[in-house]
């Protein structure tokens, strides 16, 4: 008699377990949306104004297509929940939230967005993926993590690859989204480093004359890092804009764990990316021997150490935010990094609005040839595509179609056009359509400024001598070791050569730990991008 | 009787289970992880023996951060104790606006460390911050607060002292308020002056509270990482890197889970041994002072 209740309980538990399993097992039928009447007409006017005063009044047209407001609002996802993980607000986190809210409004889906600080993003995404748990359907993260993430990502289905918006994504950013021949990341941003300068100073005849008198050289937008140093040195400590405060030559991201590695690679690119030498910039892809302590990199670090004299007080501890406000706020003459500082300078209330110019990263007059172990004397330039937010759908997600629909909606033409105008969103040009100067002129940019901006960005697309991030498993470890070495040299704790020798040793250890074959196989993808092979 | 005891002991189970889940299990799990090769590309608990511990022995960055922490934690806690004690003595007796001062002294402690570090970062900003402006106004040269090793360490210590002195103040004030009045009356009758009363009565009587407050602060200070993260990111170079911040880099950012497990356990053992020793020494020192 006493056993019967337990048996009954066991039977109920078994049924409950089976039901739960059935409900949680991959179920494509659950994923498919129902059809409903659209909430938007073709070509409707789209604006973010109703979401608060923090958004500009800008209005754009809903461009017809499968990702448009009109098309997505035909889908009924009510009763389904989409889980998204993204960076903290505002950079990429804010547009993630905004478009999640809009997606809820127009499809009836429930969208849960988790925003986490950058330091935790990698772990919060990767750990559940590695454990096979579908904790999040959609993930936003820096595209250079592809080496860690790729095994767990669902390839972007053909129907999304064939949307007009996706077909307009530049070749470079499609490459960035691709892993072993499959597009596994959904492009939502395009990042690269380039040079920004103050034209009110460089084009000022009095400044040009003074510079010529002092150096015997013409004052112009620097074409090489040596010229950059000359110009930065000349103007450092001078009040070149007459506001009563001293100005400085260069603002760079130098805070150890705040993307310093990208700044250093920008400086190294023209010294290490030799168009005549194939097979890797960071490693020799055949042997996986680190090249980070070869003469090209050492010279770049030497340059960076010398540049300290041209930085504003505190410049040796500048994070990205400091760099943005130092250049964008008019404190420094030049800087190089992502679009943010340029966009900051172009804000309507900026005192240097339309007094700036974008230009390719400085190059060099010689480039190291690791095959001949000597310097090739020739002008060299190497655009650097670095970072870039991206998005992806988890292979283990049970809501893949809804997830891709969300990303398709996130990046539709109307949303992207509006997102590009909001600097804090961290969304930068990644489609050919974004290289239209008229778009920027409509925002109040002077034609010359808009022209320099789009020409610089689109010019990088055409280069055949590009450098990409080290997109391999364990990239954070490699870059952490590099940042540590660069910081040690900048702080005077080590000479540039010793610091980079230490980094090379660390990199060899990391490669051994992760597995040489695994890293090598991933690195071949990077080399293929750089060598166009 | 045995049956009753057994039933009674069953009531302890929820507590013991909770204790196991929140303390023992994570500890055992960390020990197991520390013997595994779990990292960003190998999310497995594969047993690799003591390889992580062997690597840690040769990790100069880890040991340098421990040495630095001793300086930072020791230095800041001593300063916090001295200032905190002074502030507590000030508002212990009847002073005008005693309640106002007590609340005011506690404000820094009630703010979030990360937020405060961010504000201090602005204060110490070398070209835009008010500290260097003030120094300039006084005709003094600007200090590279966050870009030179010495000033960066000093800046970090200033923030720590500013943030946590109120905690010391709070504990010591509570200790002072609970002291018996008789010894002070006896000292007054014997004609002891203020200084002598402090050294011979107040200070020895405060020994248990002083030891407890110092140890609590040392435990907290040994975990110093949030201010480092915001203020200096461990730089310039690695001159302000603490074990807590290094563990964050290895464990959370680089996802060297096995290795960071080994480091955190070693760090835990070192802290337990050190703090036990410090507590014993402090107790003995205060006791000697009291006996004399």
Image: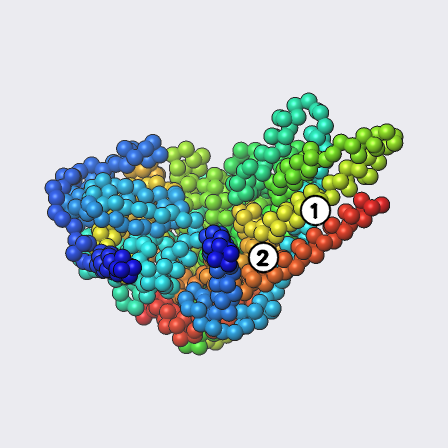
Above-or-below relation of A74 to A280 = above
Q: Quadrant of the C terminus of chain A?
A: bottom left
Secondary element at tag 1: helix
Q: Which residue is mark 1?
A: B211
Q: Residue at x 30, y 50 (%)?
A: A83
Looking at this view, name the residue that lies furthest to the front.
B1
Q: Residue at x 29, y 54 (%)?
A: A137
Q: Is residue A190 left or right of residue B84?
A: left
Confirm or deny contact between disc 2 and disc 1 (CB under 8 A). no
In the rendering, at what x and y percent does residue B110 appear? 55, 37
Using the numbered discs, state the Cα–Cα distance from disc 2 to disc 1 in whole angstroms: 24 Å
Q: Residue at x 35, y 39 (%)?
A: A446
In the rendering, at what x and y percent does residue A128 appear? 36, 59
Q: Is residue B164 visible?
A: yes
Kindly identify which chain the residue marked by label 2 belongs to: B
Colour mapping used in the image: rainbow
Above-or-below relation of A120 to A532 = above
Which badge, 2 or 1, comes first in the chain's sequence? 1
Quadrant of the image occupied by residue A490: bottom right
Q: Which residue is mark 2?
A: B243
| Neighbourhood count class around disc 2 (C-alpha, 10 Å): few under 14, some 14–19, many 20 upward | many
In the rendering, at what x and y percent does residue A522 appear? 37, 69
């Amino acid at each position: 008699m006493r056993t019967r209740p337990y048996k009954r309980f066991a039977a109920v538990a078994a049924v409950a377990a089976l039901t739960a399993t059935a409900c949680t097992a991959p179920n494509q039928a659950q994923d498919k949306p129902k059809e409903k009447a659209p909430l938007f007409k073709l070509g409707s006017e789209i604006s973010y104004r109703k979401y608060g005063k923090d958004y500009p009044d800008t209005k754009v047209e809903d461009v017809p297509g499968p990702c448009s407001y009109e098309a997505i609002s035909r889908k009924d996802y009510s009763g389904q929940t989409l889980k998204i993980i993204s960076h903290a607000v505002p950079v990429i986190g804010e547009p993630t939230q905004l478009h999640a809210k809009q997606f809820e409004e127009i499809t009836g889906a429930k969208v849960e967005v988790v925003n986490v600080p950058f330091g935790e993003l990698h772990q919060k995404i990767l750990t559940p993926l590695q454990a096979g748990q579908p904790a999040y359907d959609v993930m936003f993260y820096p595209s250079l993590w592809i080496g860690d993430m790729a095994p767990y990502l669902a390839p972007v289905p053909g129907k999304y690859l064939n949307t007009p918006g996706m077909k307009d994504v530049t070749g470079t950013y499609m490459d960035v989204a691709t892993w072993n021949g499959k597009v596994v990341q959904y492009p939502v941003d395009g990042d690269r480093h380039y040079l920004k300068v103050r034209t009110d100073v460089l084009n000022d005849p009095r400044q040009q004359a003074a510079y010529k008198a002092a150096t015997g050289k013409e004052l112009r937008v620097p074409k090489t890092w040596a010229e950059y140093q000359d110009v930065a040195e000349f103007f450092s400590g001078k009040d070149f804009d007459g506001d009563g405060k001293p100005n400085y030559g260069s603002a760079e991201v130098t805070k150890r764990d705040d993307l310093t590695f990208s700044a250093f690679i920008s400086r190294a690119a023209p010294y290490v990316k030799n168009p005549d030498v194939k097979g890797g910039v960071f490693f020799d892809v055949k042997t996986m021997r680190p090249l980070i302590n070869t003469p090209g990199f050492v010279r770049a670090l030497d340059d960076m150490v010398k540049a300290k004299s041209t930085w504003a007080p505190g410049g040796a501890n500048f994070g990205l935010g400091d760099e943005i406000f130092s250049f964008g706020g008019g404190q420094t003459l030049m800087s190089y990094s992502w679009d943010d500082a340029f966009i900051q300078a172009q804000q309507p209330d900026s005192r240097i609005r339309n007094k700036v110019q974008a230009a390719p990263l400085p190059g060099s007059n010689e480039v190291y040839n690791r095959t001949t172990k000597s310097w090739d004397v020739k002008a060299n330039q190497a655009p650097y595509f670095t970072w870039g937010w991206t998005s992806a759908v988890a292979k283990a997600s049970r809501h893949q179609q809804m997830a891709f629909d969300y990303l398709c909606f996130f990046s539709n033409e109307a949303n992207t056009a509006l997102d590009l105008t909001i600097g804090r969103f961290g969304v930068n040009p990644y489609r050919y359509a974004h290289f239209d100067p008229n778009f920027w002129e409509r925002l109040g940019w002077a034609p010359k400024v808009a022209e320099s901006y789009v020409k610089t960005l689109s010019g990088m697309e055409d280069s055949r001598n590009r450098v990409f991030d080290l997109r391999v498993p364990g990239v954070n470890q490699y870059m952490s070791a590099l940042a540590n070495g660069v910081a040690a040299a900048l702080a005077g704790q080590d000479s540039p050569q010793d610091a980079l020798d230490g980094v090379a040793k660390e990199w060899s250890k990391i490669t051994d730990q992760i597995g040489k074959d695994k890293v090598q196989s991933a690195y071949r993808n990077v080399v293929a991008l750089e060598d166009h092979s | 009787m045995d049956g009753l005891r057994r039933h009674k002991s069953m009531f302890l189970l929820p507590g013991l289970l909770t204790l196991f889940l929140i303390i023992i299990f994570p500890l055992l799990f960390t020990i197991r992880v520390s013997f595994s090769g779990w990292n960003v590309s190998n999310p497995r608990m594969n047993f690799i023996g003591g390889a992580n511990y062997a690597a840690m022995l040769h990790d100069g960055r880890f040991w340098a951060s421990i040495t630095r922490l001793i300086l930072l934690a020791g230095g800041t806690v001593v300063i916090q104790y001295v200032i905190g004690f002074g502030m507590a003595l000030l508002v212990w007796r009847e002073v005008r606006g005693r309640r106002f001062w007590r609340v005011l002294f506690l404000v820094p402690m009630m703010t979030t460390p990360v937020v405060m570090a961010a504000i201090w970062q602005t204060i110490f900003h070398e070209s835009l911050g008010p500290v260097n402006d003030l120094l300039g106004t006084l005709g003094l040269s600007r200090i590279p607060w966050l870009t030179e090793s010495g000033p960066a360490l000093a800046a970090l210590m200033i923030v720590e002292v500013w943030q946590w002195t109120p905690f010391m103040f709070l504990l010591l004030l509570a200790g002072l308020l609970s002291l018996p009045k008789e010894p002070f009356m006896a000292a007054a009758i014997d004609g002891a002056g203020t200084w002598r009363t402090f050294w011979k009565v107040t200070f020895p009587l405060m020994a248990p509270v002083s030891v407890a407050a110092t140890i609590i602060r040392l435990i907290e200070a040994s975990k110093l990482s949030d201010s480092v993260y915001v203020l200096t990111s461990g730089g310039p170079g690695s001159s302000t890197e603490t074990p807590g911040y290094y563990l964050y880099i290895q464990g959370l950012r680089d996802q060297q889970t096995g290795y960071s497990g080994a480091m955190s356990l070693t760090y835990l053992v070192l802290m337990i041994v050190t703090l036990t020793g410090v507590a014993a020494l402090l107790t003995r020192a205060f006791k000697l002072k009291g006996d004399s």
